[in-house]
Amino acid sequence: MRYTGLGIKNRYVFLLIVMVFMTMFLPDGYALSEQDLVIVIDAGHGGQDTGVVGPGGLTEKEVCLDLAGRVKSLIDKGLGYRTFLTRSRDEAISLTERSSLANNNRGTLYVSIHLSGFPDQTIQGFGLFYIDQAYLAPGSAEQTGNKLPLWDRQQIPHIKESRRMADTLHQVFVQRFPGQTDLGVHAVPIYPFATLGMPSVLIEPAVLTSPVQEGLLRQDNFREEIANAIYEGIRLFVKQAGSGAVHE
Ligand SMILES: [Zn+2]
């Protein structure tokens, strides 16, 4: 026998044990570790920037702030993940500042809450948005006509997960708001998203220019339903990521 010491069989067994032991200490692929999660909740607009104003005077900035607070407290109570609000009062924060706040606070998920607005007041419903490779790839600025600086690339490794998070939230809204129009999931050149180093989505859970939806948005229970749906979408997204759904 050329093999001395450990027999060849034993060597395989030994190697196997070492490999199993090593996997116990390997980072879990792209899966999200729940204790490291920091959910950044971004309430759109604020201060001078009212966002969309409904026909009855309700402003996007105030509804977004209220919804963001509701989502935060649902996560705090229900999931115990760390949460971070880009604004917790009526103040103006630039898009770049929001992005820096999210990155500097080690955000792991970014959910920006806005409301839609259309010239046609009969349009109502919900929509989901994320930024896509087409708006970030080198040379794409001319092709797509967007104005994103090419050095804003932090989102690139997260696009697939951003898309999955948008899809997950979208599915929850389709199930929970069957009476509303599904305005779909769209890849768009939303500026600060290029600089976000984490899966990021923008949700427009209702249309403020619709008098019907503006009426609903004034109601506490409708706001709570929206906050609950966003919470559920985040919960599902994290659970699916944690189960290895994102391993490649
Ligand atoms: Zn907005």
Image: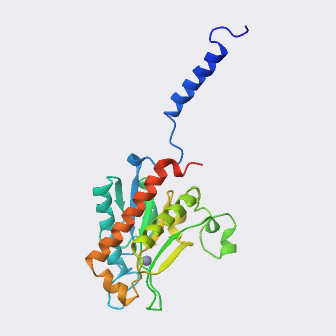
Q: For ligand 1, give the image quadrant.
A: bottom left
- Give the left or right position of residue 76, taking residue 178 as reference: left
- Give the left or right position of residue 112, taking residue 26 as reference: left
At a point 51% along the width and 40% down the height, the residue shown is 27
Is any atom of residue 108 visible in this view? no
Name the quadrant containing residue 159: bottom right
* Image x and y of residue 161, in percent: 53, 58
| Location of residue 244 with respect to 115 vertically, above or below | above
* Image x and y of residue 170, in percent: 47, 69
* Front residue (pair 47, 188): 188
* Image x and y of residue 39, in percent: 39, 57
* Front residue (pair 92, 209): 209
- Give the left or right position of residue 209, taking residue 69 as reference: right
Is any atom of residue 79 visible in this view? yes
| Location of residue 215 with respect to 19 vertically, above or below | below
* Quadrant into which the N terminus falls: top right
At a point 38% along the width and 62% down the height, the residue shown is 232
Name the quadrant containing residue 216: bottom left
